Image (cartoon, grey):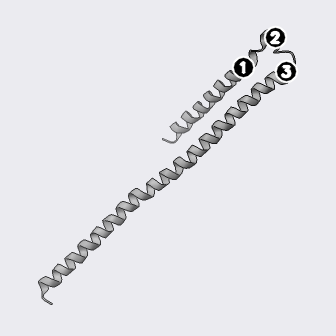
């Protein structure tokens, strides 16, 4: 085989190998992290939905406890107080959650 043909054949195989390596690297650096991000978003979304449902149920339980277990304390003109206390509890819970999220976000940087 002449040297020119052998050199061209080696160059062609080197180019094919280079293209294959570039494709493999691109897939490794894009598809892998995207899968990880997708998995994180899926678990985070599921956790947020579960936490939201649990929070609503806890607030309803607080309201019902204030209405039913306090006897006549919140009867008559004071019947609005359990609702106010429940809203205050919700705002305090949101504030604590936001403070925790902001503190956790600043520590990771």
Q: Is 44 situated left or right of 1 in this image? A: right
Residue 97: where, in percent of width, then height?
A: 61, 32
Residue 83 is marked as 1
Residue at the spot 68% in from the left edge and 32% down from the top edge: 56
As drawn, 59 above or below 14: above
As drawn, 99 above or below 70: below
- Give the quarter of the image for residue 27: bottom left
Q: Is 35 situated left or right of 64 in this image? A: left
Residue position marked by numbered label 2 in the rendering:
76
Farthest front residue in view:
76
Circles 3 and 1 in contact, beta carbons < 8 Å: no
Residue 6: where, in percent of width, then height?
A: 17, 84
* CA distance separating discs 3 and 2: 13 Å
Sequence-first tag of 3 and 2: 3
Mark 3 nearby-residue class (10 Å; few <14, some 14–19, many ≥20): few
Helix, strand or loop at mark 1 = helix
Residue at the spot 56% in from the left edge and 45% down from the top edge: 44
Sequence-first tag of 3 and 1: 3
Helix, strand or loop at mark 3 = loop
98 vs 81, nearest the viewer: 81
Mark 1 nearby-residue class (10 Å; few <14, some 14–19, many ≥20): some
- Give the quarter of the image for residue 87: top right
Mark 2 nearby-residue class (10 Å; few <14, some 14–19, many ≥20): few
Circles 2 and 1 in contact, beta carbons < 8 Å: no
Residue position marked by numbered label 3 in the rendering:
70
Residue at the spot 39% in from the left edge and 56% down from the top edge: 30
74 vs 15, nearest the viewer: 74
Sequence-first tag of 2 and 1: 2
């Amino acid at each position: 085989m002449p040297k020119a043909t052998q050199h061209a054949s080696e160059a062609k195989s080197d180019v094919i190998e280079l293209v294959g390596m570039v494709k493999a690297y691109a897939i490794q650096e894009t598809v892998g992290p995207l899968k990880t991000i997708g998995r994180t978003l899926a678990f985070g979304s599921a956790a947020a939905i579960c936490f939201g449902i649990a929070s609503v149920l806890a607030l309803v339980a607080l309201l019902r406890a204030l209405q039913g277990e306090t006897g006549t304390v919140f009867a008559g003109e004071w019947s609005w107080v359990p609702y106010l206390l429940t809203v205050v509890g919700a705002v305090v819970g949101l504030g604590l959650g936001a403070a925790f999220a902001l503190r956790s976000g600043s520590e990771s940087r």
